[in-house]
Image (cartoon, helix red, strand yellow):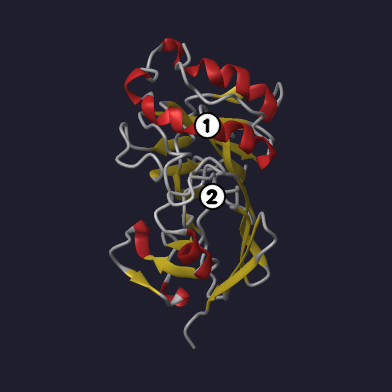
Amino acid sequence: MPTPHALPRLSPLALPRHLPRLAAIAALSLLTATTALAQEPGADATWKALKPDVFGEQPIAEASPLVRLTAPVRAEDAAMVPIEAEVMLPAGDTRTVKKLTLIVDENPAPVAATFSFGGARHDVTLGTRLRVNSYSYIRAVAELSDGSLHMGARYVKASGGCSAPALKDEEQALKNIGQMKLRVVEDGNAGVSSGDATQANRLSRLQLMIRHPNYSGLQMDQVTRLYIPAKFVDNIEVKQGDELVFSMVGGISLSEDPAIQFSYEPTGQEIDVRAADTDGRSFEGALKPAG
């Protein structure tokens, strides 16, 4: 049963042209936390309506043993909900991981991001932070090289993430927009990091953060009381030498200052990042191996 003031459902591929219509009622979503959906058998009804829009009639292996999604049961901050998705193929499986799509069922634009991977990836680990607008399933759907789809899901209790005020004022946010941090994170442990890509091993990850307010179009300027137009990072490409590590197409559900941590196969070649936002700005960064 939907919440009384739930935001209207949009096509998951809809562009921010719909956001002004949503803005007038976005603030009301903050008042519905106590009446939001409890996890129950009917809580995935939205997914049943959403799935054909994103994947057509293609079958999906739900609760697949190949995909593991971790997320908090109750989020501390609905505007920055940490999630991590792992896709692990069994030994001897000749298929590779081609794509990973992150979905927040109850968000106004449910498809948070789609990642496409280069190379022959038999395992992928990817973490980021998402906005969650009301109690919702978060889903990670992996597409393998044979075209099959496999899903992991977690139910998260959070509310108001898409309309929560930005952490920084607009002037400060725009001043630093596009600044990047890129580093190697050993063994997936953020406590031991290095800028030397030659020291990475097979279990290493890269951590990328881009300074960007990632405005959703549902946030109110606390001074003018006007809604801030949508402005967010919608494309990222990471390469190692000439080889693609991943490319991403993103939406409004990625948090402010998008942060992505991902596994990769280190070769010692330079890591290059190119990104762009919906205003046409381009950003670049690199991690150079030690000489």
Residue at horizontal 52 percent and vertical 28 percent from the top: 105
Q: Is there any visible trace of residue 87 in the rendered image?
A: yes
Q: Position of residue 131 (x, y in %)?
A: 46, 41
Q: Residues within 10 Å of mark 2 (few under 14, many from 20)?
A: many
Viewer-proximal residue among 107 and 97:
107
Q: Which mark is residue 215?
A: 2
Judge by depth and name the residue closer to the eye, 131 or 291: 131
Front-most of residues 285 and 266:
285
How crowded pointer 1 is (Cα within 10 Å; few <14, some 14-19, many 20+) is rated as many
Circle nearer the viewer, 1 or 2: 2
Placement of 241 over or under 39, stated as above or below: below
- Percent across and percent down for residue 160 are 41, 34
Q: Secondary structure at mark 2?
A: loop
Q: Which residue is mark 1?
A: 107
Identity, as a three-letter code, of the amino acid under mark 1: Asn
Whichever of callouts 1 and 2 sits on the residue coming sooner in the sequence is 1
Badge 1 marks a residue whose secondary structure is loop
Q: Based on the displayed image, in which of its 4 quarters is residue 183 positioned? A: bottom left
Q: Amino acid at mark 2?
A: Tyr
Residue 214 lies left or right of residue 96; in this view the side is: left
Give the residue displayed 47% in from the left and 69% down from the top.
182
